[in-house]
Amino acid sequence: MTCGFTLSTEVVARRHKPSRRSARAAALVLFACCFLPLRAASADTLARANAAYSRGDYVGVVRMLTPLALRGNANAQALLGFMYENGYGAPQAYDAAVDLYTDAAIRGNAFGQGMLGLMYDKGHGVPQDVVLAYKWLNLAAARASRRERDYFLRLRNAVASKMSPAQIHEGQRLALIWALGRP
């Protein structure tokens, strides 16, 4: 999936291991880039949600994205997960964010996969698990556009720096098994 993002994430992810601030900024950049619709029916809603996000109307964003997410729109699920993770327009709820990221990730949404990987890395809403973090970040990098791929690879490599060779191998194995079972 490509989001059509035109700004560079290189500025955000200069270091091998991004800081919290740069990781949050990059997540915001990826959040904004993923508003391009997959279907015409949701295009207007996603565009209005993007405009509301730009204005700081986070409650409006949550209100607009929720029906799309409930209908299985992977972009809306991933973006709504971001809103819940960060407490924008809704109470901060890591469990809800993980559920939404998981739904988006299963549908092949690179942003959802990457954010789910970060949740596993941090242990937010799930038990901390660097192997699963590596798996989801690896899958996100494989599906993302070139600019996004570089960012997800930097995050994956930062996670890998905390892992043993056996853990990295297991993360790669899990990603491969998951990818082979998907279209």
Image (spheres, helix red, strand yellow):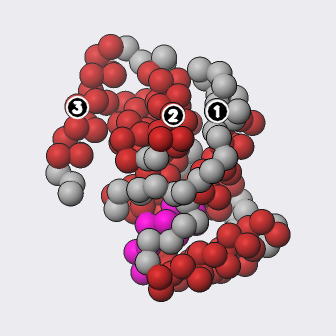
**Residue 25: image x %, image y %?**
71, 43
Name the residue located 81 percent from the left edge and 67 percent from the top edge.
Answer: 56
- The amino acid type, in three-letter code, at marker 2 is Asp
Q: Which residues are magenta?
A: 70-80
Q: Earlier in the sequence, mark 3 or mark 1?
A: 1
Which residue corresponds to mark 1?
Answer: 10
Magenta stretch: dominant SS? helix
User: Which class describes the residues within 10 Å of circle 1: few (<14), some (14-19), or many (20+)?
Assistant: some
**Residue 166: image x %, image y %?**
28, 16
**Residue 21: image x %, image y %?**
75, 36
Cα separation between marks 3 and 1: 28 Å
Placement of the C terminus among the 4 image quadrants = bottom left
Cα separation between marks 1 and 2: 8 Å
Helix, strand or loop at label 3? It is helix
Question: Is residue 58 in view?
Answer: no
Helix, strand or loop at label 2? It is helix
User: Which class describes the residues within 10 Å of circle 3: few (<14), some (14-19), or many (20+)?
Assistant: some
Cα separation between marks 2 and 3: 21 Å
Horizontal side of residue 81 vs 134, given as left or right: right
Reply above or below: 75 against 82: below
| Nearest-to-viewer mark from 2 and 3 | 2
Name the residue located 40 percent from the left edge and 62 percent from the top edge.
Answer: 103
Name the residue located 17 percent from the left edge and 46 percent from the top edge.
Answer: 180
Asked if the residue under mark 2 is in contact with the one under mark 1, i.e. CB atoms within 8 Å, the reply is yes
Which residue corresponds to mark 3?
Answer: 173
Which residue corresponds to mark 2?
Answer: 150
- The amino acid type, in three-letter code, at marker 3 is Arg
Question: Is residue 76 in view?
Answer: yes
